[in-house]
Amino acid sequence: MKKKLVIALLIAAALGIAGGCGKDSKNISSDTVTEGVSSDVAAEMIEYDVEDYVTLGDYKGIEVSIENTYDVTDESVKQEVETQIAAYPVYNKLDKTTVENGDLINLDYEGKVDGEAFDGGTAKGQYLEIGSGSFIEGFEEGLVGAEVGSTVELNLTFPEKNYKEDLAGKDVVFTVTVNSIEEKVDINFDTLTDEFVSENFGSESVDAYVKGVRENLETTAAENKEAAIQNAVFSVVRENATFSGLPEGLLDQRVDQYMKQFEEMCDAYGLTLEDYLSSYYQMTVEDFQTQMEDYMQFQLEAQLVLEAVAKAEKLELDEEGFRDYVNEVVSSSGLESEDALYDQYGKDYVEEQYINTEMSMKFLVDNAKVTWTEPEQTTEPADAAGENTEAPADAAGENTEAPADTEGEASAAE
């Protein structure tokens, strides 16, 4: 199955900018901006009457039932703490001096092919469990019997299959220094210390750290809960609406804007759009454009519904809410200031988009009837965001318990 592209709308999404506006809107040109891309894509605003394209069905008093998976519990806090501290393993050096199978050792190594060091073949302070099979054949076996503090030369051969093409089948010499034999200390929720959380998280105490984790989970849960309400309510409102097409040229304009954005992004990295899509998503430019058209169709229809609600209810600007909205847009879009936002889009237009998006959605939610149901019991408890917090495996599906060094990848690893 082909991967779905997650399209970052950034400013355009935050403002609801679609290259179109109602007839009462300011007729301006708009630069569509993407982080990291200096876009000069400008589009004349397309004017239209929203009633010509969407007829609202029932949109007030919408009844929705949502499973409540958003409560922050002591268990979810504990799970989050356990997940976070797992990224900061603690080791104690042992008095043991000779390496045996099953030992956890700390080592430095440098690998050379034809006398030349290669990328990823050097590491310092790397942890390795002897016998784990984490490194190429012969590497771990060659360290059994080595003394702490000694340096060992390992003459090995990289595998022919399932390895980097430029190294596959080549002879390699690893120069390895055994720094120490250690054991991992079991740090968990119940054994946390003030020293550990201070060193790794900058918290003054375990209580302060745990309190901060709970507060972050509660903030995330509240945001996700609000998003769940909006999604549930708007889905019904959208389903109740009837569409009779889109304003002429609006879909083509939006797709063209974002196709050009992606081309600029690729160009900034020295890639063509075709190469980028082929390499990272296994799709053609034509496939991408088709997906973009479907996505933009969906977004524009959603915009029309919200505009229609704002017009039907004669919504007027909420000054306090607008201030918060502008600050968030400026912050998230990377603009230098509020004035920069207005210079780019025009204050009247930004105000209109706030009414047509934020205020319309708030109206729908405020007038909806939401019923919360208890979540079904599962074998895996959910976190505050409603998702399982089990620590994911790394991209290679290997054990990530031992931390990698900070100087480069361990290309000796299989």
Image: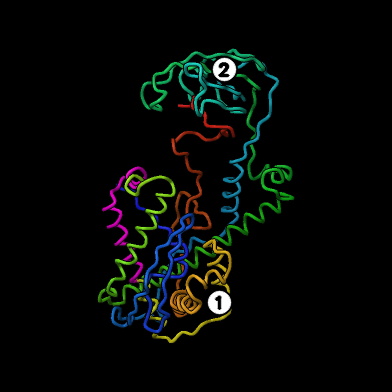
Q: Please report the residue visible at 48 percent of the width from the left and 57 percent of the height from the top.
A: 35
Residue at mark 1? 321
**Badge 1 element:** helix
Residue 278 magenta-highlighted: yes
The main secondary structure of the magenta stretch is: helix
Please determine whether, in this image, residue 316 is positioned above or below residue 217.
Answer: below
Quarter location, residue 319: bottom right
As measured in the structure, the alpha-carbon distance from the residue carrying label 1 to the one carrying label 2 is 63 Å
Task: Kindly identify the amino acid type of the residue bearing the numbered disc 2.
Answer: Thr
Q: Residue 386 at x, y = what percent?
A: 48, 57
Q: Which of 198 and 388 is in front in this view?
A: 198
Q: Please report the residue visible at 41 percent of the width from the left and 28 percent of the height from the top.
A: 164
| Quadrant occupied by the C terminus | top left
For the residues bearing labels 1 and 2, Cβ distance under 8 angstroms: no
Q: What stretch is highlighted in magenta?
A: 277-301
Please determine whether, in this image, residue 124 is positioned above or below residue 192.
Answer: above
Residue 369 seen in the current view: no
Quarter location, residue 244: bottom left
Q: Nearer the viewer, residue 239 or 136?
A: 136
Q: Residue 350 carries which label?
A: none
Residue 411 magenta-highlighted: no
Q: Which mark is residue 175?
A: 2
